[in-house]
Image (cartoon, rainbow, N blue to C red):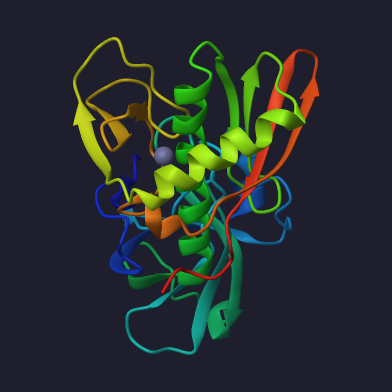
């Protein structure tokens, strides 16, 4: 069953009440769902709920982590280490039952639970992802002919990749444009578009409704299911770390400070 992706409509929520749909051992999941649990300990479990604020890995943005617990205060918890979404829009929360959860699982179908995402991690991912958009706008303004081929917004690996060649001499140019866009504190707005010529990104389901679009100060419009800060200044100082090239593709690596701007 499809999970209601609450983070697409309100990415400011850090806790949410919902109900358990299923709690299964990873080994009992269908093959396509087990394949999403790569790097998760095989003895861990998968929870699904009617709705979720947990962001599933996708669009270059890493998964949220956090805790899911019973709505009453039983000393049991489910520690979420990875969240993934199936092609059908079912969102799986992989993790570990801790506390008394082993004895009699409070995570039975229909049980009321509270989701709590780890806020510092989400906020950092949001700023890293939003900074990727800002680098994208800078690149579009400076090198409109270069086609974007890839984006990664993971900590320590964040980079945007483009067809064509860029060298170290371009670094200050890109840095300057990025700084300008951050300083201008341009609004980052989310809208839903019915336009049929838009391609979906991998964070959104196969086209069966409007596409979520992120735009920065009216300068660009990208189909995107990721989480964003409200305006460009909130990402903090973006650093263009390094420019490298491989097989005709240039990689612009960047980072943002771990700490939020006051
Ligand atoms: Zn985005």
Residue 152 in view (yes/no): no
Nearest to the observer: residue 168 or residue 71: 168
Residue at the spot 80% in from the left edge and 14% down from the top edge: 247
Residue at the spot 25% in from the left edge and 42% down from the top edge: 189
Residue 196 in view (yes/no): yes
Instruction: Count all numbered tags in the image, as a single digit.
Output: 0
* In the rendered image, the vertical position of residue 240 relative to residue 70, given as above or below: above
* In the rendered image, the vertical position of residue 151 relative to residue 257, given as above or below: above
Horizontal and vertical percent position of residue 89 = 39, 36
Horizontal and vertical percent position of residue 117 = 44, 68
- The quarter of the picture where residue 15 lies is bottom left
User: Is 185 on the left-hand or right-hand side of 90?
Assistant: left
Horizontal and vertical percent position of residue 214 = 32, 36
Horizontal and vertical percent position of residue 74 = 43, 88
* In the rendered image, the vertical position of residue 136 relative to residue 102, given as above or below: above
* In the rendered image, the vertical position of residue 86 relative to residue 56, given as above or below: above
Q: Residue furthest right?
A: 246
Quarter of the picture holding the C terminus: bottom left
* Ligand 1's quadrant: top left
Residue at the spot 38% in from the left edge and 78% down from the top edge: 70
Nearest to the observer: residue 53 or residue 71: 53
């Amino acid at each position: 069953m499809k999970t209601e992706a609450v983070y697409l409509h309100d990415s400011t929520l850090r806790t949410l009440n919902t109900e358990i749909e299923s709690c299964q051992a990873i080994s009992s999941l269908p093959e396509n769902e087990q394949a999403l649990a790569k790097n998760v300990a095989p003895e861990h479990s998968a929870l699904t709920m009617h709705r979720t604020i947990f962001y599933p890995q996708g669009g270059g943005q890493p998964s949220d982590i956090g805790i899911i617990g019973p709505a009453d205060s039983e000393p049991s918890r489910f520690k979420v280490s990875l969240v993934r979404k199936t092609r059908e829009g079912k969102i799986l929360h992989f993790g570990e039952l801790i506390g008394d959860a082993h004895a009699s699982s409070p995570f039975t179908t229909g049980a009321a639970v509270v989701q709590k995402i780890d806020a510092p991690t989400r906020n950092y991912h949001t700023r890293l992802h939003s900074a990727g958009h800002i680098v994208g706008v800078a690149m579009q303004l400076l090198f409109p002919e270069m086609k974007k081929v890839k984006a990664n917004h993971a900590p320590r690996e964040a980079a945007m990749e483009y067809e064509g060649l860029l060298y170290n001499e371009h670094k200050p140019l890109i840095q300057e444009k990025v700084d300008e866009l951050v300083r201008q504190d341009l609004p980052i707005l989310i809208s839903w578009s019915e336009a049929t010529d838009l391609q979906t990104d991998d964070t959104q389901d196969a086209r069966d409704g409007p596409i979520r679009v992120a735009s920065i100060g009216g300068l660009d419009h990208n189909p995107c299911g990721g989480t964003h800060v409200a305006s460009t200044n909130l990402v903090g100082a973006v650093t263009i770390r390094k420019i490298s090239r491989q097989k005709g593709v240039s990689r612009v690596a960047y980072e943002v400070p771990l700490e939020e701007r006051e």
